[in-house]
Amino acid sequence: MASKQQKEYNTGKVVKLQNNNAIVEITDNDACGSCGLKSFCIQNTKENIQLEIKNTQNAKIGDVVKFEISPGIKILSNFYVFILPLLVIIATYFIAKDLLLLSEDFSIILSVLSLILSYFIIKHINRVFKKNKTIKVKMIKIIN
């Protein structure tokens, strides 16, 4: 019998209220422990990660809340961080070698340097997501 996959929730502390939204500072928790992006996301940053979440539970500043990030966003994030740079490297190699008729060595060097291009593409996508508030996060409940 197949078992149901248990939902993973994140927790964070409300640090600011804006209109009907809460600015929640993410804390490292159990859901982070099983996430493949943990080392990229929380541990290696000096800045606190904050999300703007619709305040459906009427949380106040200082409340710790439980929230859920949709699985689709997690999959999309993995694609942008891990697959997109690989696709850019491969595309750069074939464009340099086959279309621009560059030597194989120079094509390889350009494809490796294209990682810098990948970085800027990911930064741009991140800005678009933040500006359009594309990431859907659902506040589940107030913990304390």
Image: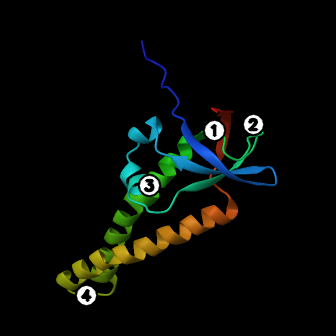
Please tell me how crowded label 1 is: few (under 14), some (14-19), or many (20+) other residues with Cα within 10 Å. Answer: many
Q: Quadrant of residue 89?
A: bottom left
Circle 2 is placed at which residue position? Answer: 57
The answer to whether 128 appears left or right of 46 in the picture is: right
* Residue type highlighted by circle 1: Val
In front of the other: label 4 or label 1? 1
At label 3, which amino acid type do we have?
Cys
- Which mark's residue is nearer the viewer, 3 or 1? 1
For the residues marked 2 and 3, what is the alpha-carbon distance in whole angstroms?
26 Å
Q: Which one is nearer the viewer's eye here, 65 or 129?
A: 65
As helix, strand or loop, the secondary structure at mark 1 comes to: strand
- The kind of residue on which mark 2 rests is Gln
> Where residue 41 is drawn, which disc sits there?
3
Query: SS class of the residue under badge 4?
Result: loop
Residue under label 4, please give it.
102
Tell me if label 2 and label 1 are in contact, CB under 8 Å: yes
Measured in 3D between alpha carbons, the distance from the residue under mark 2 to the one under mark 1, in whole angstroms, is: 9 Å
For residue 47, say whether it is visible: yes
Q: Residue at x 50, y 47 (%)?
A: 74
Judging by the rendered image, the residue that carries numbered circle 1 is 65
**What's the CA distance linking mark 4 and mark 1?**
55 Å
Residue 88, above or below 68 = below
Q: Is residue 24 above or below residue 66?
A: below
Q: Residue at x 29, y 76 (%)?
A: 111
Q: Residues within 10 Å of mark 2 (few under 14, many from 20)?
A: few
Q: Nearer the viewer, mark 3 or mark 4?
A: 3
Residue 99, position as x, y percentages in the image: 34, 83
Residue drawn at point x = 51 percent, y = 33 percent? 8
For the residues bearing labels 4 and 1, Cβ distance under 8 angstroms: no
Disc 2 to disc 3: CB gap under 8 Å: no
Please identify the residue farthest to the right as the structure is shown: 19
